[in-house]
Image (cartoon, grey):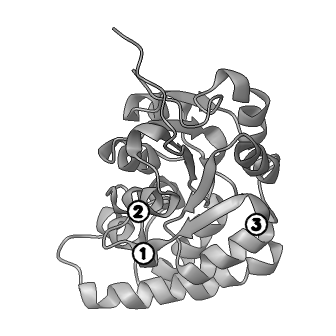
């Protein structure tokens, strides 16, 4: 197969945030567990964890019966948000996360955060990351009509980056990230920091799986992020 011609089109690396750059997956699990319990729903934390990374619309569809009173969904989401906000002052990035963003930007990638969180939550996490100078743009659940695993958020992130799908890579920690990226035509690198296994992420379509942001940073030259904007065969 002939090699694709070089182009000046920009390359972009799109990052999920919860569980990929921030150590927040289990905090969300606890907040949803308590919000559901307060409103009469008994759901195990193990089941809730498997839904983290989806938007709240898809998560509640996954966890609760189809014949539920959907008018209560907004109440459940609001309860989760209040409970989760108690952790805001203590949120911390995963080791190596900020340095990974900076190194991607230094190599010429346009760095976009693509989070299923609300705009307010995303602002809190972006401040906690402390790498504003490396970030081109941030997209949130407020920018998409449907959240992950739908591809809407990935499409919005590509638009903010001004990049085509073939010149982008998505980095995420959940199968929902891999599925959303795949539907948008963007290859995905998986991280194990969200509690999903290497086998599950690869089975969902991840190109490769790394242990953490720090691990990906240490292996950057052998990853899909080695060459900004490179064409793929």
Q: Does dot 3 land on a helix, a strand or a loop?
A: helix
- Reading the image, the residue beneath label 1 is 143
Left or right side of 118 for 121: right
Q: Residue drawn 40% across and 46% down?
A: 164
Left or right side of 51 for 208: right
Q: Does dot 1 land on a helix, a strand or a loop?
A: helix
Q: Are marks 1 and 2 in contact (CB under 8 Å)?
A: yes
Q: Are marks 3 and 2 in contact (CB under 8 Å)?
A: no
Task: Between residue 119 and residue 92, name the one nearer to us.
Answer: 119
Quarter residue 1 falls in: top left
Q: Are marks 3 and 1 in contact (CB under 8 Å)?
A: no
Q: Position of residue 51 (x, y in %)?
A: 44, 58
Q: Position of residue 32 (x, y in %)?
A: 52, 73
**Residue 2 higher or lower than 123, as above or below:** above
Q: Nearer the viewer, mark 3 or mark 2?
A: 3
**Residue 78 higher or lower than 2, as above or below:** below
Q: Which mark is residue 132?
A: 3
State the quadrant of the C terminus: top left
Q: Earlier in the sequence, mark 3 or mark 1?
A: 3
Q: Residue drawn 48% across and 67% down?
A: 116
Task: Between residue 200 and residue 9, name the one nearer to us.
Answer: 9
Q: Which mark is residue 153?
A: 2
- Cα separation, mark 3 vs mark 1, equals 20 Å
**Residue 45 higher or lower than 182, as above or below:** below
Q: Position of residue 169 (x, y in %)?
A: 51, 41
- Cα separation, mark 3 vs mark 2, equals 20 Å
């Amino acid at each position: 197969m002939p090699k694709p011609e070089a182009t000046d089109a920009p390359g972009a690396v799109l990052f999920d945030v919860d569980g990929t750059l921030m150590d927040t997956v289990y905090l969300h699990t606890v907040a949803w567990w308590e919000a559901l319990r307060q409103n009469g729903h008994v759901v195990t934390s193990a089941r809730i964890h498997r839904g983290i990374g989806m938007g709240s619309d898809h998560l509640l569809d996954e966890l609760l019966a189809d014949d539920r009173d959907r008018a209560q969904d907004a109440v459940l989401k609001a309860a989760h948000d209040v409970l989760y906000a108690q952790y805001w002052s203590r949120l911390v990035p995963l080791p190596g996360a900020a340095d990974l963003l900076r190194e991607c930007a230094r190599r010429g990638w346009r760095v976009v955060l693509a989070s299923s969180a609300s705009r307010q939550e995303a602002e809190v996490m972006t401040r906690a990351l402390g790498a504003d100078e490396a970030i081109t743009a941030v997209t949130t659940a407020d920018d998409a009509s449907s959240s992950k695993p739908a591809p809407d958020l990935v499409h919005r992130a590509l638009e903010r980056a001004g990049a085509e799908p073939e010149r982008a890579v998505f980095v995420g920690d959940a199968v929902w990230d891999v599925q959303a990226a795949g539907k948008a035509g963007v290859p995905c690198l998986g991280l194990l920091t969200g509690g999903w296994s290497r086998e599950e992420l690869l089975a969902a379509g991840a190109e490769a799986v790394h242990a953490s942001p720090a691990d990906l940073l240490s292996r950057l030259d052998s990853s899909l992020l080695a060459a900004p904007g490179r064409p793929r065969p």
